[in-house]
């Protein structure tokens, strides 16, 4: 949701190529438009910006050739104001001396704009961001220096912000501030960086400081100064050494990150399980003592949460999955001391999920989380966070983090069941073996997905049906297809499909079914027969030796036998990820950058 990439060279080298690279590394956060501002040695500011993707803009505007040893850049996912050049960051004040990039939403923009225009400021864009340089400009008139004007401006802002700012009269500093929207500082040998996310600078340094709410300050060649608005005065923040590697944020020979990440799932699930084993201590006792358990998440992570609800229920552990943005209205009034909330979030920064866990904390509930990013907001605000070992996920559509999340939830409930005397040893063993079988599923289904995508590309709609443990898989499969291939795909509980959705089914209508050989099997067959008798084109994901479902289907993806249980998502979702990927590619879309989406949704 907008990416900030800023850099100061300690050796006075040109930073534009690095800022350009940072923006490319952050493009998954937004790609409506982009801009860079660089200060040259003689103190002149060069600002280049326009609508388009980073590579196109670099060719058009020559980002990489900009001269100067300090600069800030931004890739935008529009919130306030249409996608055009004027609304593209960086934004400046009336004097052109204060240059700002921003991620977040300033909620009291209207009243601040009125305050500023009444004082003669000329605001040229429709963005909330442009308020910031003008506010600082206004408070500079008080004559107490930039830092004081900056602090005062921050104290007036309501909403969420991550900011990087250049003030031309102090051109050896990059000012920054963070409230609610993520911002990290990278500490390199030859540069300091300020960025929305660690992958921005991972190719140069793994040392990072994760800024916290209320932090503001500056980086300069003399070091890093961090203050906090709420505690007052300077603060020390720990320097983390991030375990991700540079290779993890490269395509490694694959045409897209999404395909690379689908193929990485054997390793990512394996790593996740090893890490979960080390982190599970203490979690089980929270589950035991909980009054009620809520699994809270958004998008794909919500489908993982829903899987958790079904998986927990299989072993008699009651939990409720709640969509994070509905949390307040749906269950907010029930949350109380003794409840356990498990926030599930790849980024650890999703605003909806963060707000839900903050509400739970205010109600004195215990907050745990499953995240992929050490130091992220949700990680920090949880009593205990289980970090998945998925590694950075760059493709906007979540793939390897969905399987990692379901692996953690499965492991959690199996551990709980074991501690309660249930015989789950075989399933734990199978879970550990699953990475090998994921490789088999990819190998045996990739060409099939390619082939089937040629049929699906001609279709406008599809249903994805599942039941029980199969339902979240169907929902996730449909979301993948919808978001990257722009094919209207609806996930539905199979039994519910006859209560309305079936009205749309006619000759050749694609129905993707997730068929597990468990207690839902016969009912799934009934749903398939109902769809088939109305002309539905049946695509199934089934166990290899399930000849009866294979016979009923027009097309089948096959998975190894023995996973018709809570581990199912780890295998069954993979053909659906591949199908969405190849349908997007055949339709000519970039699966890594689906339109209107951003990887990390840090606004409401
Ligand atoms: C879909 C997708 C999104 C995210 C959602 C939550 O492919 O990636 O639906 O799952 O925005 O993001 P996190 O997991 O970062 O909280």
Image (cartoon, helix red, strand yellow):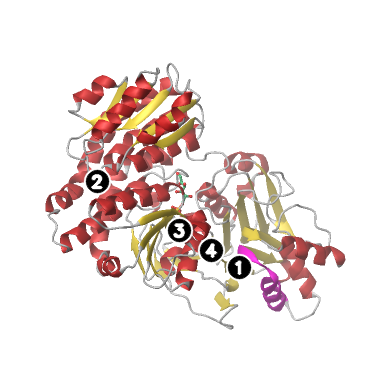
Q: Nearer the viewer, residue 147 or 38?
A: 147
Counting residues from the N terminus, which is met first, the one under dot 4 or under dot 2?
4
Q: What mark, if any, has residue 176 been given in the picture?
A: 1
Q: Please, what secondary structure does the residue beneath circle 2 have? A: loop
Density class for disc 1 (Cα within 10 Å; few <14, some 14-19, many ≥20) is: many
Q: Please, what secondary structure does the residue beneath circle 4 have? A: loop
Q: Is residue 328 above or below residue 545?
A: below
Residue 90 appears left or right of 410: right
Contact? badges 1 and 4 (CB < 8 Å)? yes
Q: Nearer the viewer, mark 3 or mark 2?
A: 2
Counting residues from the N terminus, which is met first, the one under dot 1 or under dot 2?
1
- Give the image location of residue 270, x and y in percent: 25, 51
Q: Is residue 524 above or below residue 123?
A: above
Q: What mark, if any, has residue 204 been given in the picture?
A: 3
**Mark 1 Cβ and ligand 1 under 8 Å apart:** no
Counting residues from the N terminus, which is met first, the one under dot 1 or under dot 3?
1
- Give the image location of residue 379, x and y in percent: 41, 65
Q: Residues in magenta?
A: 146-161
Q: Nearer the viewer, mark 1 or mark 2?
A: 2
Q: What mark, if any, has residue 63 been given in the picture?
A: none
Residue 13 appears left or right of 412: right
Q: Please, what secondary structure does the residue beneath circle 1 have? A: strand
Residue 66 appears left or right of 28: right
| Residue assigned mark 4 | 183
Q: Nearer the viewer, mark 4 or mark 2?
A: 2
Q: Nearer the viewer, residue 98 or 211?
A: 211
- Give the image location of residue 406, x and y in percent: 31, 50
Q: Is residue 150 magenta?
A: yes
* Residues at marks 1 and 4, CA–CA distance in whole angstroms: 9 Å
* Residues at marks 4 and 2, CA–CA distance in whole angstroms: 36 Å
């Amino acid at each position: 949701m907008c990416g900030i990439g800023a850099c100061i060279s300690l050796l006075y080298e040109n930073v534009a190529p690095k800022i350009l690279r940072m923006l490319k590394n952050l493009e998954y956060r937004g790609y409506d438009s982009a801009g860079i501002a660089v200060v040259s040695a003689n103190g002149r500011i060069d600002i280049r910006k326009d609508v388009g993707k980073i590579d196109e803009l670099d060719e058009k505007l020559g980002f990489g050739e900009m001269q100067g040893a300090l600069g800030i850049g931004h890739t935008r996912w529009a919130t306030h104001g249409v996608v055009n050049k004027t609304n593209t960051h960086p934004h400046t004040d009336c004097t052109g001396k204060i240059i700002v990039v921003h991620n977040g939403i300033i909620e009291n923009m209207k009243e601040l704009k009125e305050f500023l225009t009444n004082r003669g400021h000329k605001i040229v864009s429709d963005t909330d961001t442009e308020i910031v340089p003008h506010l600082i400009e206004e408070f500079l008139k008080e004559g107490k220096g930039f830092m004081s004007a900056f602090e005062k401006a921050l104290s007036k802002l309501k909403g969420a912000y991550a900011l990087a700012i250049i003030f031309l009269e102090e051109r050896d500093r990059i000012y920054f501030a963070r409230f609610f929207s993520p911002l990290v500082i990278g500490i390199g040998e030859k540069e300091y960086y300020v960025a929305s996310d660690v992958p921005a600078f991972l190719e140069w340094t793994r040392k990072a400081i994760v800024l916290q709410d209320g932090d503001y300050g500056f980086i300069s060649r003399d070091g890093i100064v961090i203050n906090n608005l709420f505690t007052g005065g300077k603060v020390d923040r720990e320097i983390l050494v991030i375990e991700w590697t540079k290779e993890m944020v490269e395509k490694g020979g694959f045409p897209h990150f999404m395909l690379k990440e689908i193929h990485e799932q054997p390793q990512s699930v394996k790593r996740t399980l090893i890490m979960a084993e080390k982190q599970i201590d203490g979690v089980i006792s929270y589950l035991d003592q909980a009054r009620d358990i809520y699994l809270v998440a958004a998008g794909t992570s919500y489908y993982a949460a829903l899987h958790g609800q079904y998986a927990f229920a299989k072993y008699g552990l009651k939990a409720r999955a709640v969509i994070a943005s509905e949390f307040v209205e749906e269950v907010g009034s029930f949350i109380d001391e003794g409840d356990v909330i498990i926030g599930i979030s790849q980024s650890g920064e999703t605003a909806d999920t963060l707000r839900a866990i903050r509400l739970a904390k205010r109600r004195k509930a215990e907050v745990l989380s499953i995240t992929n990013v050490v130091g992220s907001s949700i990680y920090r605000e949880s009593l205990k966070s289980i970090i998945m070992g998925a590694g950075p996920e760059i493709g906007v559509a979540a793939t390897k983090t969905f399987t990692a999340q379901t692996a953690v939830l499965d492991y959690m409930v199996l551990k709980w069941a074991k501690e309660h005397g249930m015989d789950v040893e075989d399933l734990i063993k199978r879970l550990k073996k699953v990475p090998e079988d994921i490789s088999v599923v990819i190998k045996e289904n990739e060409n099939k997905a390619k082939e089937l995508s040629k049929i699906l590309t001609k279709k406008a709609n599809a249903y994805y049906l599942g039941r029980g443990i199969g339902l979240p898989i169907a929902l996730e499969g449909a979301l993948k297809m919808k978001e990257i291939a722009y094919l209207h795909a609806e996930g539905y509980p199979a039994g519910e499909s006859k209560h309305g959705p079936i009205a749309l089914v006619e000759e050749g209508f694609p129905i993707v079914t997730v068929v597990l050989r468990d207690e839902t099997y016969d009912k799934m067959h009934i749903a398939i027969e109902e769809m088939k008798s109305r002309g539905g084109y049946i695509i199934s994901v089934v166990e290899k030796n399930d000849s009866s479902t294979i016979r009923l289907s027009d097309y089948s993806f096959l998975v190894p036998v023995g996973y018709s249980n809570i581990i199912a998502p780890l295998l069954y979702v993979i053909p659906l990820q591949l199908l969405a990927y190849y349908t997007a590619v055949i339709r000519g879309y970039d699966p890594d950058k689906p339109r209107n989406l951003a990887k990390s949704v840090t606004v409401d």
